[in-house]
Image (cartoon, grey):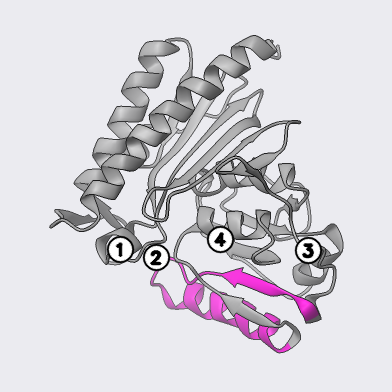
Amino acid sequence: MPVEVSQKELDEFFHCALDLVKEAGQMVRSAIQEDKQVETKASFADLVTETDKGVEKLLISKLSEKFPGHSFIGEESTAGGTKNDLTDNPTWIIDPVDGTMNFVHTFPMVAVSVALAINKEIALGFIYNPVLELLYTARKGRGAFVNDAKLKVSSCTDLAKAVVMSEAGSGRDQERIDLIFQNMKNILPRAHGIRSLGSACMNMVMVAGGNADAYQEFGIHCWDIAAGKIIVEEAGGYVCDMNGGPLDLMARRVLCASSRELAEQIVKLVKYMELERD
């Protein structure tokens, strides 16, 4: 049975999370130039630091204290063995440091990404890059903003005039690498250019702000794209599966664009591997 949440409750969720995201961001900002304890997860290029773990612990502990009936999906708790379960229950989806490789190397494209799903639909989204002091927020039906300025996607509908965000990801098996770069090779001759920031959520807010026109990637996770989804949509953009169908948050692939027309052109050029669901 669908969960009923009032606008007053949503506003409370928003303002509480906003304060915590700002607090978490300052942890990232103060740590980025410091020496880091770096561990690996699925591959030598899939990194985690004490800051990733500390930020996620802060967010989950304080949100669960404030909203004890809510559920959580977090990148680091998932890596530690916690099972992901996206139900109708209000569920916070958390990437404590999106762009951990960037964070380790002090490249400034890092962000705290937090989304709230209710009835499996994203209702709130926050992406905070504390290094560049860019705070992106969105509430369903109420627009998307960066530092209180309204976001709007570009008017691009033609791949020949588009900048497309693409990523190599952290996986290092040859089949996956070949497919990722084949997608880029298919797009590049037909587009103005390809860009890569090393952070899924930062790629998505570039589309939301009209700084880029599209973004495609497979191999990512729900916590990489949940907040970005609502921010792009509330900025007037289009978000879908790489096959052109509706986005499945747990399917580990995404395509977002300034327009449906542009997304449909990219769908024809990209392929993906079926990976284990989140």
Q: Earlier in the sequence, mark 3 or mark 1?
A: 1
| Image marks 2 and 1: residues in contact by CB distance under 8 Å | yes
Check the picture and name the quadrant holding the N terminus: top right
Tag shown at residue 263? 3
- Report the residue at 66% width, 56% height from top: 209
Q: Residue at x 41, y 12 (%)?
A: 66
Q: Compare marks 3 and 4 and give the one earlier in the sequence.
A: 4
Q: The residue under label 3 is which amino acid type? A: Ala
| Residue shown at the point (24%, 37%) measured from the top left | 54
Spatial CA span between label 3 and label 2: 24 Å
- Residue tagged 4: 203
Q: Amino acid at mark 1?
A: Ser
Above or below residue 221? Residue 43 is below
- Residue at image mark 1: 43
Would you name the residue on which mark 2 appears?
A: 170
Category of crowding for the residue at label 2, using alpha-carbon neighbours closer than 10 angstroms: few (below 14), some (14–19), many (at least 20):
some
